[in-house]
Amino acid sequence: MTGPEIVVDRSSPVPLYFQVAEQFSAAIQRGELAPGDRLDSELQLADRLGLSRPTVRQAIQHLVDKGLIVRRRGVGTEVIRGEVRRAVELTSLHDDLARAGRQPSTSVLELATVVCPAQVAAALGVTAGSEVQHLRRLRFADREPLAVLENWLPLDLVRLTLDGLQSRGLYAILRAAGLRVRGAQQRIGARAATAAEAQMLGERRGAPLLTMTRTAYDDQGRYVEHGAHIYRASRYALEVTVAER
């Protein structure tokens, strides 16, 4: 058996599935259930708790929807790390994951010289139709897909390589090339995942995604990169500190 001792109160007005889900959630928050721990099957849990399988299935789905556990084909149901919480600052996702104790890794999906799209050219302040470096990466946290990162950079700034992009974040590469990124114009939004995006990120089609577009500039006021990124809303959150004016 994997998991805490679950006690349900049949006289309570709180639905039984919610009682089960909340007790599992509390055990995960306490660290009693650690990332990678597997839960008993629905049949085993139903038998152990004296509940129906539909009730247990609803409890498990509630935990999945909260991003606390995941169903893996051929493995079963297991606890995952909590969502990545990232402050809205001028940092790279790679560096933020490393600082948070998560293991970042990257799969480079595309790295090429392309004709700059008109909207990107306007953001970077380059001539429409000019060539830029285009890269697209799938970023993982602890081997779990988290985000798809797409960026465009002027050709004359730094020459990117597959090896470099797989081992370091983009901003670390820019810093190593002597570029000092000082600020950015950034926009955050949300939309539904396409079928292709859902497949890459391990989500269902139409699942909510966070979006972020950013155009960064250096200490000389030059635009150095434009990014259009998508993040799994079930695994990722942006935090903002606000103050009264």
Image (cartoon, rainbow, N blue to C red):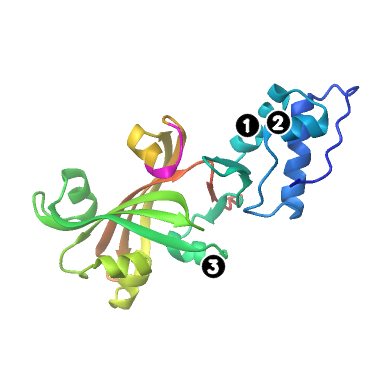
| Residue hosting label 3 | 99
Q: CA distance from mark 2 to mark 1?
A: 14 Å
Residue found at x 22% / y 70%: 158
Can you see residue 90? no
Q: Residue 130, relative to residue 43: is it above or below?
A: below
Estimate how packed mark 2 is, as few (under 14), some (14 to 19) or many (20 or more) residues with alpha carbons within 10 Å.
Answer: some
Element carrying mark 2: helix
Residue 141 in percent (x, y) is at 49, 57
Percent x, y of residue 123: 24, 51
Q: Please tell me whether mark 2 or mark 1 is closer to you in this view.
A: 2
Residue on which disc 1 sits: 61
Q: Horizontal placement of 128 versus 180: left or right?
A: left
Residue type, label 1: Gln
Q: Nearer the viewer, mark 3 or mark 1?
A: 1
Element at label 1: helix
Residue in front for this viewpoint, 204 or 224? 204
Q: Earlier in the sequence, mark 2 or mark 1?
A: 2
Residue 22, relative to residue 156: is it above or below? above
**3 or 1: tag closer to the N-terminus:** 1
Q: Which secondary structure class fits the magenta region best?
A: loop
Circles 2 and 1: CB atoms closer than 8 Å: no
Residue in view at x 79 percent, y 40 percent = 23
State which region is magenta.
200-204
Furthest residue in direction left, as rendered = 129
Disc 3 element: helix
How far across and down, in percent of the image, does residue 244 sit?
A: 61, 49
In the picture of the structure, the residue carrying the numbered disc 2 is 43
Of 70 and 224, nearer the camera is 70
